[in-house]
Image: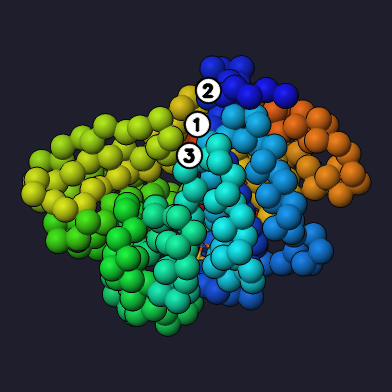
Amino acid sequence: MAKEQLIDKTNRVINYLRLSITDRCNLRCTYCMPEEGINFLPHSEILTYEEMLHLVRLSVEAGIRKVRLTGGEPLVRKGFIPFLESLCRIEALKEITLTTNGVLLKELAADIKACGISRINISLDSLKAERFFQITGRDYFDRVWEGIQEAERLEFDPIKINVVVMKGINDEEILDFARLTLEKPYHIRFIEFMPVGANNGWSPKKFISMEEIREQIGTLGVLRPVKSNPLDGPAQRYVLERAKGEIGFIGALSNHFCEKCNRLRITAEGHLRGCLFSDQEIDIKSPLREGKGDAHLFDLISDAMKNKPREPGAGRHGPRKCIRQMSSIGG
Ligand code: SAM
Ligand code: SF4
């Protein structure tokens, strides 16, 4: 089996795995999940933790060095901490991190830290409790904010805060979020609103580009670029003068980053997915459960890597829709 970094047909090094550990969630963000929920997978169709660990080990053989746990909401799945402990024992992984909505973070942050995790992404689209409720359908702003404070107290570093910006909904808070980096060591990452999943409310009227957001923030002062490292995602990173934190921009639609994309995804039901915006998937759970050997599973992983879509998934040709819900892919 290959022990080297796997390079796809366009010379992209695929070293970053996003693993969706559940499709369940305790929020109902309007852009991600309808109030009634989605057709959640039966539990038997979701990969077990054992299966996930098996697939991560094989992915490491194929060159994966960074894993991000996502969902749905990863912290709602029972047994999350023991799973994280096992994952952290996979030596070749240089970085393990997670994306959470923060609702359960206050309770779990210390255990997560004790596993050896210190990098965390927390999603928060508003600094106002009422708007948070409108966006997420749940009155949990205080819980999320306390979770962020707890992560800061425990010295998670970096603490990245993901903000999906929607025109007419939360765009008036762009400067408040940017100003937060002056007082707090947070990395605020503005994410363009994407048309993912059926009826997620996306429309050109609600779309605001990274360029527009950067221009607004420019009114606060000069944005100095920060150099990124090879395992970094697609965010363009900046700091404001005298800031304790950073500002990042993820232009998923306006500034597609396909040529630099280093990601592979495994969905909660055990499908390998090369691109968020392409519904092309490989079922790896069935062969795994049928007892096909590791060599076969490894080939499926390396096929998914080599055949990652090359075309801009979004942007140049107008936004392409992804039919699957974001919550089952993991963002
Ligand atoms: N539940 C966790 C959370 O919200 O952080 C992890 C899963 S969530 C699907 C991962 C990320 O995708 C979140 O930062 C969320 O804001 C983002 N996201 C979901 N739907 C999106 C959309 N339509 N456009 C842009 N970002 C989206
Ligand atoms: Fe849940 Fe995250 Fe989707 Fe919001 S974005 S509904 S928190 S999975």
Work out whether mark 3 precedes mark 1 in sequence or the reverse, and give the earlier one: 3
Few, some or many residues within 10 Å of mark 2 (<14, 14–19, 20+): many
Identify which residue is drawn at 32% across, 43% down.
Answer: 249
Which one is closest to the eye, mark 3 or mark 2?
3
Query: Is residue 297 placed above or below 221 in the rendered structure?
Result: above
Marks 3 and 1 sit apart, C-alpha to C-alpha, by 18 Å
Residue highlighted by disc 2 = 12
Marks 1 and 2 sit apart, C-alpha to C-alpha, by 7 Å
Identify which residue is drawn at 80% across, 60% down.
Answer: 45
Residue 316 position within the rendered picture, expressed as x and y whole percent measured from the top left: 46, 30
C-beta proximity under 8 Å, tags 1 and 2: yes
In terms of secondary structure, where does tag 1 sit? loop
Work out whether mark 3 precedes mark 2 in sequence or the reverse, and give the earlier one: 2
Q: How is the image coloured?
A: rainbow
Q: Is 66 situated left or right of 158 in this image?
A: right
Which one is closest to the eye, mark 3 or mark 1?
3
Residue highlighted by disc 1 = 261
Front position in the image: 110 or 180 = 110
Few, some or many residues within 10 Å of mark 3 (<14, 14–19, 20+): few
In terms of secondary structure, where does tag 2 sit? loop
Quarter-of-image position of residue 44: bottom right
Residue 34 position within the rendered picture, expressed as x and y whole percent measured from the top left: 59, 69
Amino acid carrying label 1: it is Cys
Is residue 269 at least partly visible in the picture? no
Few, some or many residues within 10 Å of mark 1 (<14, 14–19, 20+): many
Amino acid carrying label 3: it is Lys
Identify which residue is drawn at 22% across, 56% down.
Answer: 185
- As drawn, which residue projects farthest toward the bottom? 139
Residue highlighted by disc 3 = 94
Front position in the image: 298 or 282 = 298
